[in-house]
Amino acid sequence: MKSILASLSFFTRLPFWKLANLESKHYASVVHYWTLSSVITSGVMVLSFFIFKEILPMKLALILSLGSRVLVTGALHEDGFADFFDGFGAGRDKDRVLSIMKDSHIGAYGVLALIFNYIILIETYSLLDVTKIFVLMIMADASSKFVSSFITYLLPYARDKEGSKSGVIYSSVDYKGLIVSVLFISILIYLFFSYAVIAAFLVITIFFLVYVWFLKKRIGGYTGDCCGASYVFMELIFCIIYLVFNTSV
């Protein structure tokens, strides 16, 4: 239970840490319970959307709902996404890539990546009806976190503990977290089953494996920024595939 609270505390700005005496060992497993944080992040996004759409145009309601999620997470994943593009866009070798990603300043690559990401997300959502928007907000968020959580199983950490931005080195294996996450995502897939959801889930799984191969080749492992970038990448791809499948079938 403490590992779950640590994960919710780590991946949101909500003070779950006040509910228990959390230690560093609990934070080591946060990635393995990452999927569960989607209850909060997607929940906030869905609730915000259904409130805003009653008083505002659809596209503006979508922008504000996505913004509400950013407020809850503190832009944690977007920060990693931007750092990823800055690092791999400007870095030519492992040391330089890791050095750039650790820099708190954002560069042109990171800014452009975030702009394009949100333009695509907003346009994708705006082309769907309200019911499909609801399903996509939940499934894209949860599925992307579930798939990305396997990064610690497949790659070593690319830095030493002293080089970690958060000061936490994630544990490579947590079978309790794996079981909980598998059960959780299985329930969601059952509740919101459609061929579009299954297709999108399978596609992001393939893209994730390609992403893992890329990280192993370039820096020999992953960093916290790579975790955040993985989530943003997978969510974006999930949304695109979901849209394509719903407009072509």
Image: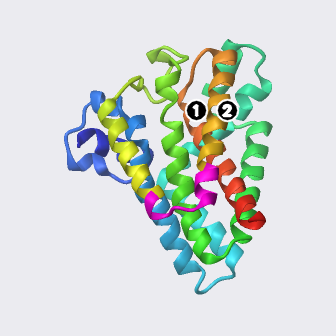
> Three-letter amino acid code at disc 1?
Asp
Quarter residue 26 falls in: top left
* Looking at the image, residue 62 lies above or below residue 180: below
Residue 68: % across, % down: 54, 63
Quarter residue 65 falls in: bottom right
What span is in magenta? 190-200
Q: Is mark 1 on a helix, strand or loop?
A: helix
Q: Report the side of 15 relative to 162 (left or right).
A: left
Dot 1 and dot 2 residues touching (CB under 8 Å) = yes
Q: Report the side of 113 relative to 72 (left or right).
A: right
> Three-letter amino acid code at disc 2?
Phe
- The label shown at residue 9 is none
Residue 101: % across, % down: 64, 27
Going 59% across and 31% down the picture, which residue do you hit?
A: 226
The residue labelled by disc 2 is 84
The alpha-carbon separation of the residues under discs 1 and 2 comes to: 6 Å
Mark toward the start of the polypeptide (1 vs 2): 2
Q: Can residue 118 be spotted in the picture?
A: no
Q: Is mark 2 on a helix, strand or loop?
A: helix
- The label shown at residue 225 is 1
Residue 209: % across, % down: 62, 30
